[in-house]
Image (cartoon, rainbow, N blue to C red):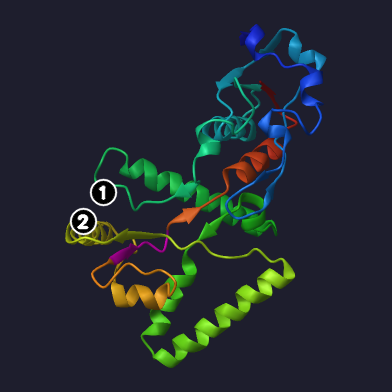
Amino acid sequence: MESLSLPANLRISLKTLTSSPKSPIPFLLPRVGARNHAVPFLRAQATAALLRRSEHDVIVVGAGIIGLSIARQLLLGSDLSVAVVDAGVPCSGATGAGQGYIWMAHKTPSSETWELALRSKQLWEELVESLKRRGLDPLRVLGWKKTVLLRVWAWLLLLSDVVYMILEWGMALNRLWGRWSGDKHDFERSLLIGRTMKELAILKERVELLSLAGLPAEFLSSSSLIYREPELYVGKEGAAAFFPDDCQLDAFQTVCFIEKVACKKFQIFV
């Protein structure tokens, strides 16, 4: 069993956590992301017990998505006690600064990290399915989005342009309804854009490479892209690569979920 003695620079006072809304500490304020939704406050413990010497079986350094996921797995799969140590608050480093993409478009088959990336994506998808089985909405819990909608359109567009027009009007009405009702259940649309001949050659090569590896991938010409994204214009010579299985989550929502699930079993020292 490791013994944890808190350094002075890792201690946080009760006064700090109860500061007014004008406090310069970021995690005390509502965060409004790119999708204009408020992210719940992140929890950080500050009790007299944390300012004293503490002992735990496992100490995880870093309260980002990786550190908290490791702590969660240890707690769910063993009887070990876990402490997560971070110089800041949860999700204040690379996790909070990232876009939350869980994608394979930038990976290279047969590379050293390929199998690891596939396994990582699979684990996230398994977590999403477990939430659905429990009657929870992954979008609301994790901010989870997957680009399934456009893949369905691809097959329907082969039938007739009339079907597409009906779908386009339907989606427009759906967006208006969502704005009126406050429903935020939209879908991310992940595309890699190319404008020059060199960039298009790279996109075509990547689509072929990932397709051979068994991943859904599609090269969209300029005209095809206009059908999919009428408001996105890349010029007559432009094109895009579309990867329908790529996903995205909200890092702040996900960290809050992981903390909430295991909050009774581990402590976070900031």
Residue 5 visible, this orientation: no
Q: Position of residue 227 (x, y in %)?
A: 39, 78
Left or right of residue 91: residue 182: right
Q: CA distance from mark 1 to mark 2?
A: 15 Å
Q: Is residue 100 above or below residue 93?
A: below
The residue under the point 67% across, 32% down is 26
Magenta stretch in the rendered image: 239-245
Determine which quarter of the picture holds residue 173: bottom right
Query: For the residue marked with disc 1, what is the amino acid?
Result: Pro
Instruction: Check disc 1 and report the residue beneath it.
Output: 109
Determine which quarter of the picture holds residue 87: top right
- Comparing 67 with 221, the one in front is 221
Instruction: Check disc 2 and report the residue beneath it.
Output: 202
- Count neighbours of disc 2 (C-alpha within 10 A) and say few if under 14, some if 14 to 19, many if 20 or more: few
Q: Is residue 149 above or below residue 33?
A: below
Query: For the residue marked with disc 2, what is the amino acid?
Result: Ile
Are the residues tagged 1 and 2 within 8 Å (C-beta)?
no
Q: Secondary structure at mark 2?
A: helix
Q: Position of residue 188 (x, y in %)?
A: 50, 61
